[in-house]
Amino acid sequence: MRIVMISNYLNHHQIPFCNEICRQTADAEQERAEFFFIQTEPMDAERAGMGWQSEYDLPYLCKYYEEEVRCHSLLMNAEIVIFGGTERRELLRERMSQRRKDQVTFVYSERLYREGQWKFISPRGLIDKYQLYTKYRRENAFLMCAGAFVASDFSLVHAFPGKKLKWGYFPGFRPLDVDQLIREKEMRIAETGRMEVLWAGRFMPLKHPEYAIRLVRDLKEAGLGGMQIRLHLTMVGGGEMEEELHRLADEYGVREDVTFTGFLPPAQVREQMLASDVYLFTSNHLEGWGAVVNEAMNSGCVVIASHMAGATGYLIRHEENGLVFRSEHYEDLRHVAEQGLGTERQRREMRKNAYQTIADTWNERVAAHRFLAFATAVLQGKEPECEGSGPLSRAVAISPRKMYNHLVCKKRPC
């Protein structure tokens, strides 16, 4: 049996899942399989400039632009294919048009309509979506929803009815002594009177990095939960808003409370998370997923996340394993931070639950195990079992206008 995953390029967020597929299919209890990852283009310079490794020497990596005949044959003949983010959509159409019962295809997708679902009414767009997805709704094809709004977007075009599954990114789980980690973090806060806040990513409008600096200013003036705890913010990244952010830090009088590191390699960002108490994820609706949320939760951070970012609706349970604020409403972010970070008991509980969410459910080991079981069942003509939560559980279509109520209002009045 052959399993193929295709995407524009291989990156560090995908490798743990790929490695786990290889490991699990090599076990005696699993049917032995060959796994291939097909990369359709070299990594772009922008990502490489952010510290991402651009070249990998892995036995399963194939490059379509170097071995087109071989890669094309793998895609068309493999029993199991995962189509990720690639511009080579004609390959998906060709694969689906074969309508073979001895194959199963998974479409791994972020949102169709990030800029607004009103765009789905475009006649040209509807024809395109029909030819690519809806036309094959009765075939052995399933949608892997990489974000909490994906199911809603695809429902608008009547694609993958009853076959939408929760998915995401699995950047690599790190087993930790979480109780010891939490003790060390809380002891440091008690001893220094300082809480370490981390923000990481590209400095661009959709990610709202300015919110982080405003929060440091406002909580410095008002205090945190009535306690004498000050915030120190580390900003990892760079981009078009960098000059503006430096100016804001000076204007707000928090220059000594903010450290700018520039872009760091992914491993160093993880180290920053381990040394941090709070992770701010302030992106708006244009953020497809946000693998930093997985990593920060794994690192025992209290994540404060925008409700419109893709990962939030799947990973964060408000006031249980993190905090959710209304996207692009800074005052709600401030309110949530003031109310949710003020007590050690609150922070300890959310830190522990965040870690367990990744350790128990949202990791590459669980994702690979569930995927192999699901795909194998489909190939054998059986009804695949869906878990109640986590990767490959049923994805419910929740519209963007209802997501905030779904995540937050059941916890507190809106």
Image (spheres, rainbow, N blue to C red):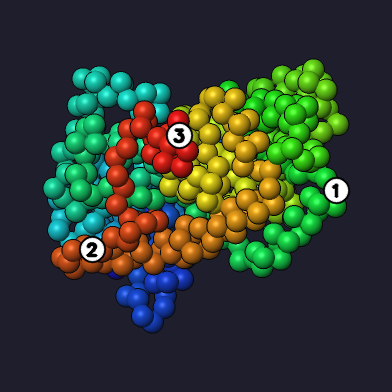
Residue drawn at 72 percent across, 26 percent down: 218
Contact? badges 3 and 2 (CB < 8 Å): no
The type of residue carrying mark 1 is: Thr
Q: Does residue 131 appear to the left or right of 354 in the view shown?
A: left
Report if residue 98 is visible in the image. no
Q: Residues within 10 Å of mark 1 (few under 14, many from 20)?
A: few
Which badge, 2 or 1, comes first in the chain's sequence? 1
Instruction: Provide the secondary structure element on which disc 2 rests.
Output: loop
Q: Which mark is residue 384?
A: 2
Residue drawn at 69 percent across, 43 percent down: 342
92, 248: nearer the viewer: 248
Q: Which mark is residue 413?
A: 3
Q: Residues within 10 Å of mark 2 (few under 14, many from 20)?
A: some
* x, y percent for residue 239: 66, 27
Rounded to the nearest angstrom, the CA distance separating label 2 from label 1 is: 53 Å
- Single out the mark in the foreground, 3 or 2: 3
* x, y percent for residue 207: 57, 29
Instruction: Provide the secondary structure element on which disc 3 rests.
Output: loop
Which badge, 3 or 2, comes first in the chain's sequence? 2
Rounded to the nearest angstrom, the CA distance separating label 3 from label 2 is: 39 Å
The type of residue carrying mark 2 is: Pro
Q: Which mark is residue 192?
A: 1
Report if residue 164 is visible in the image. yes
Which badge, 1 or 3, comes first in the chain's sequence? 1
Q: Quadrant of residue 406?
A: top left
Residue drawn at 71 percent across, 66 percent down: 180
